Image (tube, rainbow, N blue to C red):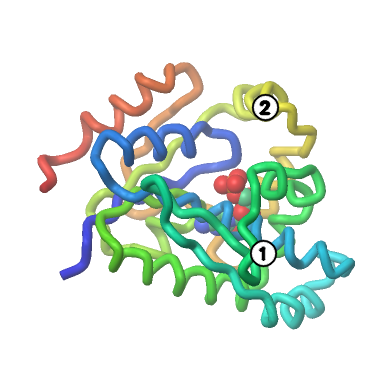
Amino acid sequence: MMNTVITIDGPAASGKSSVARILAQRLGYIYVNTGNMYRAMTWAVLQTGIDPNDMDTVRSTAEGILIDSPVADGQTQVSVNGRRLTAEDLNSDPVNRGVSLVARVPEVRARLVADQRALSSLGPLVMEGRDIGSVVFPDSPLKFYIDASEEVRAARRQAQGHTDQVAERDRLDSTRKASPLVIPEGAVVIDNSHLTLEGAVQAVLDRLPAIP
Ligand code: C5P
């Protein structure tokens, strides 16, 4: 039997990662940040010096890159060809700028989606990203979409010290051909523009049916 998967999707800086992490801790589920898998692939692609705008070269370069997601401390980590990446690696400005370009390549997505599905054999999951409820686990009955106004999201990114253009990343993520960001069918939408972290976690918990 497949383990329970709570899916959490939403645009950049909507606060979904913090909500997903705390929710997973409360429930004793494994927390999976799929954005970090795309970021790891982007980090590795950029290491080769290629232009991330060039889809064909990204596609062929990505083929030779091995992304692994071992679980430690209740959440997946990411390693590239055996090297564990740090938060600094994953959140650098070049990765912020390049990740939506790498994530739009269908072959990159197909591989990472297969890895994400395989993680559900490890135990119950809270998995967050852009296409988790729509593509990765469309049959999950526990889907959430966490949104926040563009102003609030831009301010959050700035407070975290990031200079990338959230709006541009969202534009690319929402308009790409392969698995664009959408509100998944059946998802509960939570507007996180004015909620505290605890309030947002509670909003999700309030909508969960009694689950084992
Ligand atoms: O969640 P985070 O903002 O770290 O994701 C970084 C980028 O990875 C997104 O802007 C998107 O381009 C890509 N992504 C994706 N599908 C996912 C998770 C992230 O395309 N499931």
Front in this rendered view, residue 123 or 103: 123
Quadrant where the N terminus sits is bottom left
Sequence-first disc among 1 and 2: 1
Query: Is residue 195 rendered to the left or right of residue 138?
Result: right
In the rendered structure, which amino acid carries the disc numbered 1? Met
Which residue is at 52% across, 29% downward?
Answer: 148
Residue 88, by quadrant, is top right
How many numbered badges does the structure rendering display? 2
Which residue is at 37% across, 37% downward?
Answer: 189
Query: Is residue 154 rendered to the left or right of residue 17?
Result: right
Please tell me whether mark 1 sits on a helix, a strand or a loop: helix
Which residue is at 39% across, 52% downward?
Answer: 127
Front in this rendered view, residue 186 or 71: 71
Question: Mark 2 = which residue?
Answer: 160
Crowd tier of the residue under label 1, counting other residues whose Cα lies within 10 Å: few below 14, some 14–19, many 20 or above:
many
Query: Is residue 17 rendered to the left or right of residue 205?
Result: right
Q: Does 82 appear above or below 13?
A: below
Q: Which mark is drawn over residue 41?
A: 1
Please tell me whether mark 2 sits on a helix, a strand or a loop: loop
In the rendered structure, which amino acid carries the disc numbered 2? Gln
Residue 83 image position (x, y, % from top left):
65, 63
Residue 194 image position (x, y, % from top left):
47, 17
Residue 37 image position (x, y, % from top left):
57, 59
Front in this rendered view, residue 86 or 44: 86
Q: Does 44 appear above or below 93?
A: below
